[in-house]
Image (cartoon, grey):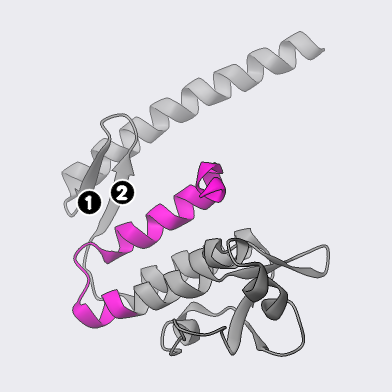
Amino acid sequence: MPLLADPSFAQFSQEIGLASLGASDEEIEKLSTVYWFTVEFGLCKEHGEVKAYGAGLLSSYGELLHAISDKPEHRAFEPAKTAIQPYQDQEYQPIYYVAESFEDAKEKFRKWVSTGMTRTYEVRYNPHTQRIEVLDSVDRLENVITQINTEMLHLTNALDKLKATLC
């Protein structure tokens, strides 16, 4: 649960949920498997060391020790392969997927979703309205682009003002 307080981790978990909207049953199964091997039992490297970030690992001292030992197989995180790997929900995992970094895992996941899903549209969470938006028309996309451009203008202005006060 504490990792969900981290904005980057919470966004990753949310992106898995957003990817499920409009997905086929087969794609939902693959997404849930990716969720299992990342949000629940994910490992990633930090300064060359394997670290746990999955909630299932962090809440189970025994499985955490098992995961970072040489007993299970450690494979590189590749969403397309991870998505079809059977998992064990009654015993310790025989296989864990290790990302090069948490950011690398997010980027690989995003790329996999954008190329590997059959959905013909995108969805996004709008934090201002706290709603999910379906981006399935040019008008909707142009509206989002206008909103983002306005936010970029405000951020650029803020950065310029901060730089001016530092000089």
Q: Which residue is mark 1?
A: 135
Taking the spot 45% from the left edge, 64% from the top edge, the residue there is 110
Give the camera-side residue of 107 and 86. Answer: 86
Give the amino acid type for the residue marked by disc 1 in the picture: Leu
| Location of residue 109 in the rendering, given as x and y in whole percent from the top left corner | 48, 68
Judged left or right of residue 77, residue 151 is: left
Give the left or right position of residue 50, taking residue 40 as reference: right
Mark 2 vs mark 1: give the one in front: 2
Relative to 73, is 152 above or below? above
Indicate the position of residue 19 as horizontal and vertical percent values: 32, 63
Q: Which mark identifies residue 44?
A: none
Which residue is found at the position 56% from the left and 18% from the top?
A: 157
The answer to whether residue 165 is visible is yes
| Foreground pick, 142 / 108 | 108
Q: Residue at x 34, y 34 (%)?
A: 127
Amino acid at the residue labelled 2: Arg
Cα–Cα span, label 2 and label 1: 8 Å
Q: How crowded is the residue under tag 2: few (<14 C-alpha within 10 Å), some, or many (20+)?
A: some
Residue highlighted by disc 2: 124
Is 108 situated left or right of 159 in this image?
left
State the residue in front, 77 or 114: 77
Q: Secondary structure at mark 1?
A: strand
Secondary structure type for disc 2: strand
Queried whether the magenta region covers residue 20, the answer comes back as yes
Contact flag, marks 2 and 1 (Cβ < 8 Å): yes
Q: In this picture, is 156 found above or below 87?
A: above
Question: Where's residue 160, x and y in %?
Answer: 65, 18
Foreground residue, 160 or 90? 90
Mark 1 Cα-neighbour bin, 10 Å: few <14, some 14–19, many ≥20: some
N-terminal of the two: label 2 or label 1?
2
Q: Quick check: 49 above or below 158?
A: below
The verdict on residue 22 being magenta is yes
